[in-house]
Image: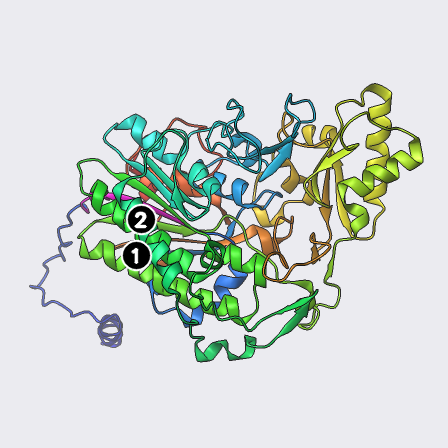
Amino acid sequence: MRRTVLRLLATAALGLSAPALAQGQPAQAAPTQPAAEPARPQLVLAVSIDQLSADLFAQYREHFVGGFARLLTGAVFPSGFQSHAATETCPGHSTILTGAHPARNGIIANNWFNPSIGRAEKKIYCSEDLSDPASTPNNPVVSANLLKVPTLGELMKAANPATRNVAVSAKDRAVVMMGGHKIDAGYWWKGNGFVTFKGRDLAPAVQRANAAASALLAKGAPALKAPLWCGPRDRPVAIGAGTVGTYRFALPKGAKPDVLRVSPRMDGATVDLALALVDDMKLGQGAATDVLSVSLSANDYIGHALGTEGVEMCIQMNELDGTLGRLFAALDKRKIDYLVVLTADHGGHDAPERLRQQAMPGATRADKALMPAALGAEITRRTGITVPQGPLIYGDGPFGDMYVNAAIAGEAKARVINELVSLTRNHPQVAAVFTAAELAATPMPAGNPQDWTIKERARASFMAERSGDVIVALNRAVTPIPEPVPGAFVATHGSVWDYDRRVPMLFWRKGMTGFEQPNPVETVDIAPTLAAAIGLKIDDGAFDGRCLDLDAGTGNTCERAK
């Protein structure tokens, strides 16, 4: 009797009913039907939020009611890693849809140098066409020629030529790195409006978008409202010759395009263009799965110009949430079955002047003595070694890749490298220094990216033919902007630290069962995950990352393409 009662209580606790059984009749298992495999999505939507750190995402998560709120019902990976050291826009975007680290895809930085290149300007921009004599790093002929691997969109087109591969952004390097070499349509903001690749015409959708932007600039727009929860961040902070922390993004009549670019309205214009291309190109409405990459850049522009912890970023995050909601609602209205992934190319850190007010007294700006020109001058003073033309040391700032002038060779070059290592390694603002030979001898890292050493992080960004003779990593909270310019550059990213490396990774599709996985994953995992979700068979070894199972139950989305 006691066993019967306990069994009935256990059954009731599980919310089940106890069926009446005939005396001696065995219980029959309910017939099961194999779960039908879901149809392939009509559209892969890859969204990158430029400079959306995992820290920023966590800070504003409780306030999301729009597009982010929807994504939080899907597969949430709050600790995604841009695991390499060069946490900049071009390398970050290059990992998302190639599934390859910069060490293999070739995009080691936004800019690198080739002291032996024939042109006078030795700097190389990550998405320029070096074969075009009209291209310069500051005014590039935009191309994906420097990207050494295909993107997901290219692999999809190779499997089915009917696939359309489209990318839009405010930045050309985001378009190129997410779209790749074979891109059906790619548009980015330059000057007064959206432009495209050399030799291509602007589509009617782009012409309409540019006309709308011109009309907005001519008419102007009022300041944007700050939600009440932005209040604690609404205060002036002195930086250099100006202040940040109270700006509301008012758009004066006849404003210059840069005023539009450094505001939440830039994201709105990018999404408007993306939706116009969806309509005009019938994306997600054909027999093949299409891919649409949308990189939203306002977080980055605002973070650089005004910092990440003021009312400006608070307004931006609120507006971004609404803009994403509008994008998803528009695709819903068009009855498009889409699979979306949202991540970031890198994180970011606030201006040291505000960080010092917020329990980080060691935050500071880089010493001018670490700038390449200053290092070269000191090496010349110590060694007497000079060059007939150009600087002794090339570099894009006080950290990252540094290169010795091509006129220096043999023992003289070795001496210059030794002096460069000594000068930087002994500087109190420097965390680590590596020579190219050291990194070339270092195996590619594996395992959890949060546990990688600084050398392993640098190795993931290293490619012998493009990387510097010496690679410098600054200490935590050392901002590599010696002299800030409020409204232009007060804060940045690019470090080896997790505030720049750690980003959210969110996947969502209608009907999927959501879950949250806090353990570390990498942005190079995105491409193999999407490939499996759409049933795209890829050769082993094509990706550096692994497929993430997006099925929260016993199924496995990583098995679909096998």
- Quarter assignment of residue 382: top right
- Pick the residue in front: 273 or 285: 273
Q: Main secondary structure of the magenta part?
A: loop
Query: What is the span of residues highlighted in magenta in the rendered image?
Result: 35-47
Q: Position of residue 423 (x, y in %)?
A: 85, 42
Confirm or deny contact between disc 2 and disc 1 (CB under 8 A): yes
Q: CA distance from mark 2 to mark 1?
A: 9 Å
**Mark 2: which amino acid?**
Ala
SS category of the residue bearing label 2: helix
Q: How many marks?
A: 2
- Quarter assignment of residue 244: bottom right
Res 274 label: 2
For marks 2 and 1, the one nearer the N-term is 2
Res 256 label: none
Residue at the spot of label 1? 327
Q: Residue furthest left?
A: 22
SS category of the residue bearing label 1: helix
Mark closer to the observer (2, 1)? 2
Q: Is residue 227 visible?
A: yes
- Quarter assignment of residue 289: top left
Query: Does 508 appear above or below 443?
Result: below
